[in-house]
Image (tube, grey):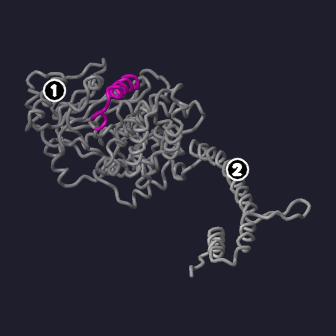
């Protein structure tokens, strides 16, 4: 049984997250600059300490510091002293860097088929009619055994279905040329944003997100405590302990394509749900998944997709996965999903607008009341690094809400250098696994190959036909030699002979010029 994780404190008050209930999901909310990122990093670091792998998207580019041992600044030390909190022991978590574009980490790829029509329609912002056509294209490809791996496969398949719409109508339904065109335009937009790099092989193996490494006092991933102290997480510093690998997705550039970002994260969560076996209640999660900028997941999302997210969040708990949403406003999360999030960290909200005031009231109403604490008022008064925290107790009930200070992480706060990033990529557990793109035979090659095969006989027949027509015209004009060597005069020769017989007259001369000029293409000048 893993020890409780101390997340926040204030005087004698301490807030502990129970690892056995960490897969009941959670929510971190608060306005910009109130400390959400530090809370996220503290949570992720503590999960790593107890051997739980973590995935998180680095939206602002400052979460990579979790891979380096921290050194508190004088300002931070002064703040901790004022709050009665000891400085954290330094800790560097084992970290794997990922990047959809393959620039700031290992490439992350999925196939078109694996993404599926629902998430792809969300990414392309398709309406219901266009989504129906896209689903039809996927079905036709499946029935024909055509693999949809990357963008060119889907483009070729769309063109094939559009060009042969009549033969698919009776079996699959009407194929709208306008919808096919709209999907093609959507693919162009995704390609312009660099999204085509996400589709291909080798596809991400979800198991690579769920790795641990042995902790040893001499390990660069976890430096030895100074002065014979205990390990950073409070237990004995034994080599048999394991640290969960922190998987950091570089999302600063990906955020320029918010639909791609949201669809990618939803695809990964769906992969976890569909791939992992049922494990029931464990003493700690198998993986913790952080959704930063969670409002992008639900913005303009169709009802079917929201229902899918709710289903996955509700059921993935039994697969040993904890999901934590990070966003500014609790109203960003649909009620059906919000009700599944048991562990809450609420940073300050600013009630400047009616929507903000509504958000403050909603946040206060969803947290368990504490006698003497006005939660709604406290939310607007919280300082940086201060939060209202309610975590599940050992019976699965939300604890009373406490006003506390979130503990700082022992890892570095802020981004790493480009040299440190390259070193992490070079020495990671998956170095060299995903870098080389594999382009095997799929729908594009088969459809283009079939079109070429069909075009070749037609071209040969046309060439033979053209040759036969030209040969026949030549014989018609200039004559031919028969099988026994006899010569048969052509039209040109006959006309020339006839014209020569009339050379004595000016009319005859004009006929000769006209006939020969027209037949031979001559440019004889008139006298």
Residue 433 percent across, percent down from the top left: 54, 49
Question: Residue at 17% across / 53% down in the picture?
Answer: 75
- Number of the label disc, if any, that sits on residue 68: none
Question: In the displayed structure, would residue 403 be above or below residue 95?
Answer: above
- Number of the label disc, if any, that sits on residue 362: 1
Question: Residue at 67% across / 50% down in the picture?
Answer: 456
Residue 210 located within the stretch drawn in magenta: no
Residue 298 located within the stretch drawn in magenta: yes
Seen from the viewer's position, the closer of residues 380 and 274 is 274
Residue 140 percent across, percent down from the top left: 54, 32
Seen from the viewer's position, the closer of residues 275 and 372 is 275
- Number of the label disc, if any, that sits on residue 461: 2
Q: Is residue 69 left or right of residue 502?
A: left
Range drawn in magenta: 296-316
Question: In the displayed structure, would residue 60 be above or below residue 210?
Answer: below
- Does dot 1 land on a helix, a strand or a loop? helix
Q: Is residue 440 left or right of residue 33?
A: right
Q: Specify which label sits upstream in the sequence, 2 or 1.
A: 1
Residue 199 percent across, percent down from the top left: 48, 45
Seen from the viewer's position, the closer of residues 58 and 176 is 176
């Amino acid at each position: 049984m893993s020890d409780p994780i101390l997340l926040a404190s204030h005087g004698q008050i301490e807030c502990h997250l129970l690892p056995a209930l960490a897969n009941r999901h959670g929510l971190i909310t608060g306005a910009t600059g109130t400390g959400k990122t530090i809370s996220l990093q503290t949570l992720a670091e503590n999960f790593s300490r107890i051997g739980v792998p973590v995935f998180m998207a680095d939206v602002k580019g400052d979460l990579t510091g979790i891979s380096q041992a921290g050194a508190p600044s004088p300002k931070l030390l002064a703040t901790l002293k004022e709050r009665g909190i000891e400085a954290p022991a330094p800790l560097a978590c084992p970290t794997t860097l990922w990047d959809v574009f393959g620039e700031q980490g290992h490439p992350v790829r999925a196939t078109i088929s694996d993404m599926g029509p629902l998430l792809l329609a969300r990414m392309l912002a398709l309406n219901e009619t266009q989504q129906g056509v896209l689903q039809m294209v996927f079905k036709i490809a499946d029935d024909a055994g055509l693999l949809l791996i990357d963008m060119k496969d889907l483009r070729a398949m769309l063109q094939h279905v559009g060009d042969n719409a009549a033969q698919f109508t009776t079996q699959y339904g009407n194929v709208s040329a306008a919808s096919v065109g709209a999907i093609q335009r959507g693919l162009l937009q995704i390609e312009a944003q660099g999204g085509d790099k996400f589709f291909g092989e080798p596809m991400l193996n979800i198991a690579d997100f769920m790795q641990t490494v042995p902790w040893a006092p001499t390990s660069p991933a976890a430096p030895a405590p100074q002065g014979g102290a205990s390990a950073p997480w409070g237990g004995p510093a034994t080599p048999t302990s394991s640290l969960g690998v922190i998987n950091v997705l570089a999302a600063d550039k990906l955020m320029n394509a918010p639909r791609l970002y949201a669809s990618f994260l939803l695809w990964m969560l769906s992969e976890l749900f569909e791939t992992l076996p049922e494990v029931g209640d464990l003493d700690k999660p198998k993986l913790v998944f952080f959704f930063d900028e969670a409002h992008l997941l639900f913005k303009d999302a169709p009802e079917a997709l929201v229902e899918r997210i709710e289903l996955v969040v509700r059921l993935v708990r039994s697969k040993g996965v904890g999901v934590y949403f990070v966003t500014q406003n609790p109203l960003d999360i649909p009620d059906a999903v919000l009700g599944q999030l048991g562990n809450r960290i609420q940073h300050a909200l600013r009630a400047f607008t009616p929507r903000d005031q509504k958000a403050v009231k909603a946040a206060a109403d969803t947290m368990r009341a504490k006698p003497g604490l006005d939660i709604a008022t406290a939310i607007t008064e919280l300082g940086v690094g201060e939060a209202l925290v309610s975590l599940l107790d050992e019976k699965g009930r939300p604890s009373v809400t406490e006003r506390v200070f979130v503990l700082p992480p022992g890892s570095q706060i802020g981004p790493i250098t480009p040299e440190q990033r390259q070193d992490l990529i070079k020495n990671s557990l998956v170095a060299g696994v995903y870098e080389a793109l594999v382009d095997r035979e799929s729908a594009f090659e088969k459809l283009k190959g079939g079109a070429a095969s069909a075009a070749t006989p037609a071209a040969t027949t046309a060439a033979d036909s053209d040759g036969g027509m030209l040969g026949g015209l030549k014989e018609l004009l200039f004559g031919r030699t028969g099988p026994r060597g006899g010569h048969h005069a052509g039209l040109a020769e006959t006309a020339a002979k006839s014209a020569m017989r009339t050379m004595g007259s000016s009319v005859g001369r004009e006929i000769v010029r006209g006939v020969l000029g027209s037949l031979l293409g001559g440019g004889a000048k008139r006298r």
